[in-house]
Amino acid sequence: MKKQYRMTPLEVLTLQKQNKLQSTSIFLASSKSESNRALIIHALAGGADDLLNNLSSARDTRTMLRLLSTEESTWDVLDAGTTMRFLTSYAAVKKLNRTLTGTARMQQRPIGILVDALRTLGAEIDYQKEDGYPPLHVKGWPAQTSPEVSVRGDVSSQYISSLLMIGPILPKGLRLGLTGPIGSRPYIEMTVTLMRKFGAEVTWEDERTLIVAPQPYQPTTYTIESDWSGASYWFSMVALAEEAQVTLLGLREDSLQGDQAIVDIMSSLGVRSQYTSEGVELKKGPTAKHIEVDFTHCPDLGQTVAVTCAAKGVSGTFTGLESLRIKETDRIAALQAELAKFGASLTEPSTGTWELIPSSSLPDEVTIHTYEDHRMAMAFAPLATRMTVHIEEPDVVQKSYPEFWEHVRQVGIETKG
């Protein structure tokens, strides 16, 4: 007898077209990048629970908080890549006996570079299934065998940050060399700055070598900034709307976050930015016909900028998108599939260089598949200023920006579903 399957309908959120946005102020979600780094450093410092302020409400950060406070032998990080990578080093240096696992997609995301580096330093870690991928078993750290290790700089800055943050706890400190091109450098600098705020001694010996002294962290009160990655979707909203004026609260001009680069990028896509004492005010401005952007140090902006260009009729030449292949989904393939639905394309005519060809005529509506990726949902949401948009599985925004749909309604875009 043939087995019968019942398909579960996808949840869909419909955003009604609205090209004139209500002027409003939005208190953005806090940065999960800062939050997760601060939580690891804070835990290594042995600080009190009330010293970190304005922690992110993102699911990744809630997962980090939960796992740091549990004594369970298995840590399930769900789909949180940062949490997996940071907790691997944390469990090792704290000599915890832990198995780290996650979703099916998480078990496809590489972690071998980090594990190899930790093993070089003395950690004992085994893979539970496929070498180089979670789940893995952190068995402990009998002794530090070496203070020196080298890792590639072009795969994920999270490996580098994970190693750096445990440096002050290592008896011999850490001398970390970076080989090849270095991507997402602002995220490395964010980690270094946060470590210093908690009393660590971290120095750049040269452009490729970081030295961390064996000097314990000190508990410190710290307030997390709002999230520039989350801000990027509002830049896109303003760029695509016919009328818009939005103030984003909680952002700082002296930010540690690399995604602050959205200010300069969007200045060519029709958004004028003005810093205030409360955050950043966004207004309409002139638009270029073509832009060139290197996303090496801000890859999470790639989807947002591609969609904005595609819908606004601006062609683009992009580099630095390589790391998008190993995110929550293959974001290159996902972008190509969804952009094609409204007549735009993203191609790679030469290795590492991508060409964005915008749509010549936009449809009245479009349905966007999100691939279990929060940034796919939020990057395509601004299309609602040009057409009706149906977002499949809208709850994926819980990963980084749980309030996003509430804020979308706040600017006057009606939602159904």
Image (cartoon, rainbow, N blue to C red):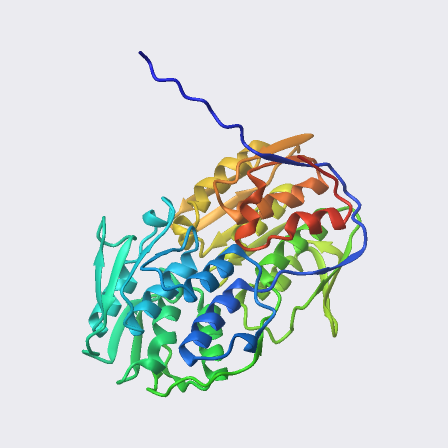
- Residue 340 horizontal side relative to residue 112, left or right: right
Q: Residue lying furthest top in this view? A: 1
- Residue 367 horizontal side relative to residue 170, left or right: right
Residue 292 visible in the picture? yes
- Taking depth in this image into account, of 190 and 313 the one nearest to the observer is 190
Please name the residue shown 50% across and 61% down the image.
Answer: 61
Please name the residue shown 61% across and 37% down the image.
Answer: 359
- Taking depth in this image into account, of 385 and 310 the one nearest to the observer is 385
Q: Up-down: is 127 above or below 47?
A: above
> Residue 363 appears in which quarter of the rendering?
top right
Residue 208 visible in the picture? no
- Taking depth in this image into account, of 35 and 75 the one nearest to the observer is 75
> Residue 218 appears in which quarter of the rendering?
bottom left
Q: Up-down: is 1 above or below 327?
A: above
Q: Up-down: is 245 above or below 186?
A: above
Residue 4: x %, y % from top left: 39, 17
Please name the residue shown 62% across and 63% down the image.
Answer: 264
Please name the residue shown 27% across and 84% down the image.
Answer: 171
The image shows a total of numbered marks equal to 0
- Residue 53 horizontal side relative to residue 109, left or right: right
Residue 140: x %, y % from top left: 23, 69
Residue 179: x %, y % from top left: 30, 69
Q: Which quadrant: the C terminus?
A: top right
Q: Which quadrant: the N terminus?
A: top left
Residue 356: x %, y % from top left: 53, 44
